[in-house]
Image: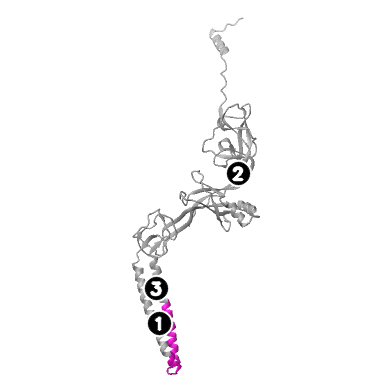
Amino acid sequence: MRTRLHPSYLLVALAAACKTEPPPPPPPDVQVMTVEQSNVPLYAEYTGQTRGSVELEVRARVEGILLKQHYRDGSAVKKGELLFTIDPANYQAKVTQAQGQMAEAQAALTRASNDVKRYRPLAEKKAIPQMTLDNALSAEEAAQAGVAAAKANVDQAKLDLSYTRISAEAAGLAGKAEVLPGNFVGRGEPTLLTQISQLDPIHARFSIPEQELIRIQQELGGMTQEQRKAKFKGAFEMELADGSRYPEKGDLIFGERQVDPTTGTLLVEVAFPNPARTVRPGQFARVRFLRGALDSAMVVPQRAVRELQGTYRVAVVDDSNRVFFRTVESPSAFGSVRVITKGLKSGERIIVEGLQRVRDSMVVNPKPWTPPSSVPPASAPAPDTAKAPAAAPVTN
C-alpha cells in the first residue's frame, strides 16, 4: 500500500534541505607584543615613611599663661626665631628676689672676711683666744657658701625667665600651634607647643628583612669603609604614593644597631635632597636599592600574565596565529610590569590585550600593542620579590 505524504511535510523537508550552516565567527582581535631578552636590573624594594632630617618638639619648660604666638602656623622659621612668649612677670620677680638674697649673702661674706682680717693679727699676738679666730674663719667659709648658693639661685631665676621666651632651636618648617594664647602651660610636664621639621634633606625610614641584611653583609665583607660609602652613595630611589618617581637619589644615613626581634627586620634611614621642599614628613615612600641584574630576562606588562596560586601563564601566538598558553617563571614585578626569567624565547609574541576572549588552540587576529605612556619600557628595572613590611609611623 502506497503512503501519501501531506503537503505540509513536503514543505518542511524542502526548507530543511535548502537551509545552510551560518559562517563561523571571525577570529577575535587581540593586541600582541614581541618579547626580547635583555639584562634586567634587579632592585630590592622596601616600604616606609618620610620624616624630617631634624625633628624637634617645642615645649614649654616653665609654667605660666601663654601670652603670644609669634609665628604663623605652617611657616618656615629660622634658628633662634621667637615662637612663643609665656607671661614673664612672676619669673622677673623671682630674679629680683634672688638678686636681693645675693646682695645679702655678699654683705655677710664681707663682714666675715673683715672679722678674719681683724682677728688674725690679734690671735698671732695671743691678744685673743685662737677659738675666736677659728670661729671667724668658719663664719667666712659659711658666708662664701651662702654667696655661691645665692648666685645659683640668681642663675636659676634668670634661666627660668629666659624660658618664657621660646625660640626655634633649629631652622625648619614649624607646624600648627598645639596650644593657643591665653592657656596655662607647663604645669606637671613640659607642654608640647609645636613641632619643627627640617625638610632639606628629607629622610625616609623603612625596615629590611633579616635575610636581606645577611646578604648585604656578605656582599660588603671584602670592602673597605670608603668602598662601602661609595656603594651606597646615591644608590637609593624613592617612589611616592601616586606612583611617581622622585627625581633625586638618596644616600644611606644609618642602620639601626639591632634587628627588631618581634618583626625580624632592621630599621634603615636614607636621605634625599629636597630643595623645593615638595616632600613632607609622614608621606608614604617606596624605596628601591639596586642589588644586581638578571641575565637574559624579559619584562612584560602585568596584564599579559595570568597568575593562579603562584603559577604564571602567558598566551603565546605562533606563526599561524594560533594561541597556546604557556607556564613561565616570574620571580619579581614592579608597578605595571613583570619579569619573566624562563618559559619564553626572544622573538615570540604574547597577548597583552584581549586575554579574556581567547582559549587554548584558538586562532586570533593579532595586532601590534602600543604601550601607554604610564607603562615602563621593556628594559625597565624590576624589584626583588622579598619586600619588608611597612615601617611603623615615625615619631620623635
Mark identifier at residue 109: 1
Which residue carries the number 2 mark? 41
Element type at mark 2: strand
Q: Is mark 1 on a helix, strand or loop?
A: helix
Q: Name the residue under label 3.
A: 154
Q: Is residue 85 magenta?
A: no
Q: Based on the picture, tell me whether residue 133 belongs to the magenta stretch.
A: yes
Callout 3 crowding tier (Cα within 10 Å): few <14, some 14–19, many ≥20: many
Question: Which is more N-terminal, label 3 or label 1?
Answer: 1
Q: Give the range drawn in magenta.
A: 120-148
Along the viewing direction, whichever of 38 and 329 lies nearer the viewer? 38
Tell me which label, 1 or 2, sits earlier in the chain. 2
Identify which amino acid the numbered label 2 is placed on: Pro
Q: Are marks 3 and 2 in contact (CB under 8 Å)?
A: no
Residue at mark 3 to residue at mark 2: CA–CA distance: 66 Å
Q: Position of residue 372 (x, y in %)?
A: 52, 35
Q: In which quarter of the image is residue 368?
A: top right
Neighbourhood count class around disc 2 (C-alpha, 10 Å): few under 14, some 14–19, many 20 upward: some
The kind of residue on which mark 1 rests is Leu
Which amino acid does the dot numbered 3 rest on? Val
Q: Specify the farthest residue to the top.
A: 1
Question: Contact (CB < 8 A) between labels 1 and 3?
Answer: no
Estimate the spatial distance between the alpha carbons at disc 1 and disc 2, rounded to whole Å.
Answer: 80 Å
Which residue appears at 41% of the width and 89% of the height? 118
Q: Where is residue 281 in the image (x, y as percent from the top left)?
A: 47, 52
Can the viewer see residue 209?
no
